[in-house]
Image (spheres, rainbow, N blue to C red):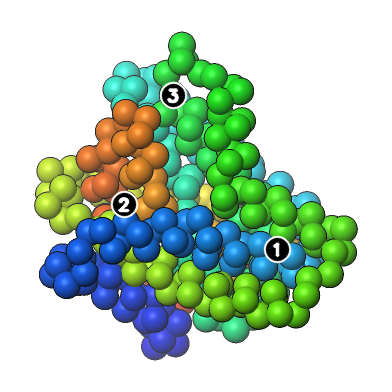
Amino acid sequence: MLQMIQILFPSIALIGLGFYLFQSGMLDEKFWNGAEKLNYYILFPALLFSALANADMNMGHLHSILGMIFLVMVLIVGSVYLFAGLTQAPAAQIGVYMQSLIRFNTYLGLSIATSLDNPEIKSILVNILAIAIPAVNVISILSLSPKNQLNIKAIFFSLIKNPLISSCILGMAFNLLHIPIWSGFTNLLSAFSSSSLMLGLLCVGTAIQFTTLKHYLKKSLVISLIRLLLIPLLAFIMMQLFALDASAVVAIMIFFSIPTASSAYILTKLLNGDYQLMAATISMQTVLSVFTLALILGLLQHFYY
């Protein structure tokens, strides 16, 4: 357990520091808005491009990993719509449920994978993210959009213009086509990548809103426990159907154990979803994940490495 605390400590400390700096007003809101834009449009896309351009995409079991990931996602999406239909959930909350259960905090996931000092785990996780980022964005937008207002063309162009998705596509293209990258540019990408994780985790801390959390305590707690405990358990059970090695199991469990993305709040607000419930759920998941990740990573360490 001590080793798991050491692995998680840098991420937790940066999130906590971000929360403190934001709440104390030491750095004003304009700084954080600028920091989020810098990371979203430049630093994080550079990290994704660099990671994918150099990732091992010829892993023999990659198809099994992706098949397992999407099987779990299909079950989650189907369950959300089934639950929404049975309970007649408000349309504004369906997208919140969906994003809370399928979106993921990429900064935290990559930070943990890097801390494990296992290149294979990081490589597998990067490949998962490359495929999952476009998929979860499509699902999230569809879940937040009323059926009579769906515009496939508009959704397609909004996805193409998304810097995270375009950087993933570009990184995979460089990798698969074996396009060389100049060493000077590689060094620049490395500097951007290092900055991205630190800044991203600080910004995650600013998304924690305890005031909003009090008003949605019960609902956000239930959603968070499903996301952080039930879904990883489901993923672990489903993995028994596939022949996966230890690195693949750890990477997949990290993917399904990290909390939802803090950027889900912005998308929910833009598309007229219940953004206050989304904010409460992001806050709850971020706080609870400190304990659930330590538990899950501890179990993985005991059984797999």
Gap in angstroms between the C-alphas marked 2 and 3: 20 Å
Answer whether residue 130 is visible to the viewer in this image. no
What residue would you read off at disc 3? 145
Q: Is the residue under label 1 in contact with that under label 2 (CB below 8 Å)?
A: no
- Where's the C terminus, which quadrant? bottom right
Instruction: Name the front one of labels 2 and 3.
Output: 3
- The earlier-in-sequence mark between 3 and 1 is 1
How far apart marks 2 and 1 lie (CA) works out to: 27 Å
Mark 2, residue position: 282
Q: Observer-nearest residue: 291 or 159?
A: 159
Of residues 182 and 207, the one nearer the viewer is 182
Mark 1 = which residue?
A: 52
Instruction: Give, as a three-letter code, the residue at label 2.
Output: Ile
Under circle 1, the secondary element is helix
In which quadrant of the rendered view does residue 201 lie? bottom left
Please rate how many residues cluster around mark 3, counting C-alpha atoms within 10 Å: few if below 14, some from 14 to 19, many from 20: many
CA gap, disc 3 and disc 1: 31 Å
Residue located 28% across and 70% down the image: 18
Q: Residue at x 52, y 50 (%)?
A: 234
Position in image of residue 267 (x %, y %): 39, 39
Residue at 46% across / 11% down in the picture?
148
Q: Crowding at label 1, few (<14), some or many (≥20) Cα neighbours within 10 Å?
A: many
Residue 164, position as x, y percentages in the image: 57, 52
